[in-house]
Image (cartoon, coloured by chain):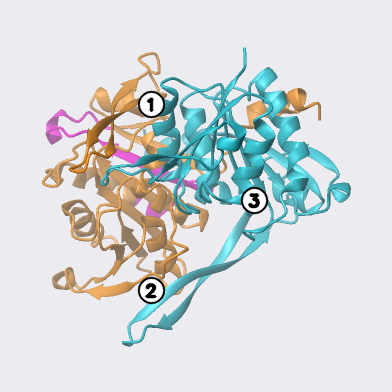
Chain colours: A cyan, B orange
Amino acid sequence: MTPTILVTNDDGITSSGIRTLIDEVRHLGKVTVVAPDSPQSAKGHAITINQPLRLVKVGIFEDWGIDAYACSGTPVDCVKLAVDKVFHKKPDLCVSGINHGSNAAINVIYSGTVSAAMEAAIERIPSIAFSLLNYSANANMEPCRKYVREIVNSVLQNGDGRNTLLNVNIPALPPEQIKGIKVCHQANAFWNEEFYEREDPVGRKYYWLTGEFVNDKMDHEGDQTALEEAYVSVVPLQFDLTAYKEMAYVRDILKK
Amino acid sequence: MTPTILVTNDDGITSSGIRTLIDEVRHLGKVTVVAPDSPQSAKGHAITINQPLRLVKVGIFEDWGIDAYACSGTPVDCVKLAVDKVFHKKPDLCVSGINHGSNAAINVIYSGTVSAAMEAAIERIPSIAFSLLNYSANANMEPCRKYVREIVNSVLQNGDGRNTLLNVNIPALPPEQIKGIKVCHQANAFWNEEFYEREDPVGRKYYWLTGEFVNDKMDHEGDQTALEEAYVSVVPLQFDLTAYKEMAYVRDILKK
């Protein structure tokens, strides 16, 4: 049976990252694309509840014989709408990306790309988020192809684990410099953030988020270190956020 | 030393939930409010990167001697801006809510209220998200007061654990029917979703998200069951999403 594959992303349906991803997975199953009609980076797991959603069929992948739909909502909206109104059942796989920029470490929390794959996982659909460590809209996605193919094939054959998704980050390096794949945990690396403060033409202040990414150098098994050492990082992620190790402590302080 | 307390939410700075929360915690420390200028429900961990942010001082809590700022961004933006541009350092505590509606089980993923508290946790600020199981804008928040006071006092005295936040949900019941506090895990309960499909005046389709919430009846220790049994649920949450139990499986299928 040919597997059915949903492709989505957060950079929008016209980005070069999703085009590369589609081009690679179209040889592995029956692909349908449902992706945002505009950039939706950093939308996290946002869903649209106060606005109606639009879903418009577009012909941009018809040369490949692939149906594609542009959605007015967030990446998570795309997955929900795809299952209910396009596939009318769960697809066999959801792949999200290829994101233009890192989704390693704490970025999983903010990422629309990862959240789309997580939504698929919540709906019990095996899923993978792919990101390249290059924020440019014109990033060279070619080095990603080999790893997309290898990881998608493994998941199609075996599943992605129980109630999980795979978060894959790929270093922005020439193919021959990439050392291979490493399975890691989400690194203990964070943004040191501040805001630029400026004034608009009528003298009112406004703020732009900016920041510096800081990795814990002792966190040798984290995805950030693997990427810095030229590996493709693969982190299985889950949507049960319970801090089980802290439950006894919380019972203690609340005297329950 | 009087503790400094950041109060935020996702329903917006004029909601009755945040007003009740402020009224209760203003006796426990020096409170400053930084909250969205408009409803931001279901925004998850979204941040604003393609728009500048506005932060406007408003006088709506000046009778209580409390500084308050309305922010044009998401709940997570509010926390980031508060730390960098209002407190100019980390406050001693962040409380988010009281949300109008449940944030139990998988709702933690979509919730702006929980994501604000999670952002504080990422920044190593003890934090608590409060939600009442009543979606009405005019919900009676009075039964929440006792539990807000008790839990905030415990966290101010002891912290909230390591790199965690507390997710507190309160049943919408008369105070005498609430049986007390139970420390739980995030329940295995999900949305069975579908979309209403309609046509606009010019015949184009649009979609509204709707759905039914389904609890796993066997999940006796989950927060959803505790709430159904009239307990206030407290779940410690973490932002390391790694599915550690699945790492061996993923190494196996990827042959790494």
Q: Alpha-carbon neighbours of circle 2 within 10 Å: few (<14), some, or many (≥20)?
A: many
Read off the chain for label 3.
Answer: A
Give the residue displayed 32% in from the left and 38% down from the top. B103
Query: Residue A33, how many percent across, how many down?
Result: 52, 35
Q: CA distance from mark 3 to mark 2?
A: 27 Å
| Tag of residue A188 | 3
Residue position marked by numbered label 2 in the rendering: B86
Q: CA distance from mark 3 to mark 1?
A: 36 Å
Label 1, on which residue? A84
Marks 3 & 1, CB-CB < 8 Å contact: no
Residues beneath discs 3 and 1 located on the same chain: yes
Task: Specify start and end residues of the magenta stretch as a single range.
Answer: B153-180
| Residue A226 image position (x, y, % from top left) | 77, 47
> Does the stretch in magenta take in B173?
yes
Report how many numbered discs are placed on residues in the image: 3
Sort mark 1 into few (<14), some (14-19) or many (20+) by Cα contacts within 10 Å: some
Judge depth for marks 1 and 2 and give the one in front. 1
The answer to whether one can see residue A103 in this image is no
Q: Are marks 1 and 2 on the same chain?
A: no
Question: Which mark, by number, is residue A56?
Answer: none
Q: Is residue A63 above or below residue B115?
A: above
